[in-house]
């Protein structure tokens, strides 16, 4: 979506002399920044939710439980973060490549 919205800007940058590698770096960096920010936000939010559920658990006496059994280890968190960052990198490469291939004439044709 970002590449489609920024088509005119990509055309202007390319007409100023930015190379395909520079355009690709811009979009890769933007995707990585958004992904890392989302990962950090997700870690904070999920940690708060887990803390709340551990501290103020719902009464589950009908299931013969006092609290919801949950335990998250650092190993699991690292696996989730590394998988997330891998997916962020993969999903950032394709739009960046598409933006880098765009020709300035085609980008500015309908503007």
Image (cartoon, rainbow, N blue to C red):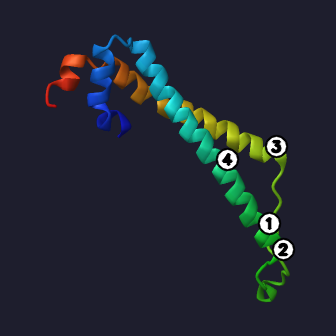
Read off the residue under disc 2. Answer: 55
- Label number found at residue 75: 3
State the separation of the CA atoms marked 3 and 2: 23 Å
Read off the residue under disc 4. Answer: 40
The percent position of residue 87, horizontal first and vertical second, equals: 56, 36
State the separation of the CA atoms marked 1 and 3: 18 Å
Relative to 74, 28 lies left or right: left
Q: Residues within 10 Å of mark 2 (few under 14, many from 20)?
A: few
Q: Earlier in the sequence, mark 4 or mark 1?
A: 4
Q: Residues within 10 Å of mark 3 (few under 14, many from 20)?
A: few
Q: Residues within 10 Å of mark 1 (few under 14, many from 20)?
A: few
* Tag 3 secondary structure: helix
Q: Residue at x 71, y 55 (%)?
A: 44
Q: If the image is split into quadrants, where does the C terminus sit?
A: top left
| Pick the front one: 46 or 68 | 46
- For the residues bearing labels 2 and 1, Cβ distance under 8 angstroms: yes
Q: Residues within 10 Å of mark 4 (few under 14, many from 20)?
A: few
Q: If the image is split into quadrants, where does the N terminus sit?
A: top left
Name of the residue lying farthest toward the front: 16
Read off the residue under disc 1. Answer: 51
Q: Earlier in the sequence, mark 1 or mark 3?
A: 1
């Amino acid at each position: 979506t970002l590449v489609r919205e920024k088509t005119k800007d990509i055309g202007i940058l390319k007409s100023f002399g930015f190379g395909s590698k520079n355009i690709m770096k811009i979009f890769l960096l933007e995707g990585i920044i958004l992904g890392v920010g989302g990962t950090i936000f997700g870690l904070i939010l999920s940690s708060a939710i887990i803390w709340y559920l551990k501290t103020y658990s719902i009464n589950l006496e009908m299931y013969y439980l006092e609290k919801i059994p949950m335990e998250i280890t650092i190993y699991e968190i690292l696996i989730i973060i590394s998988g997330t960052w891998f997916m962020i990198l993969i999903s950032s490469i394709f739009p960046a490549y598409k933006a880098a291939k765009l020709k300035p004439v085609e980008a500015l044709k309908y503007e």
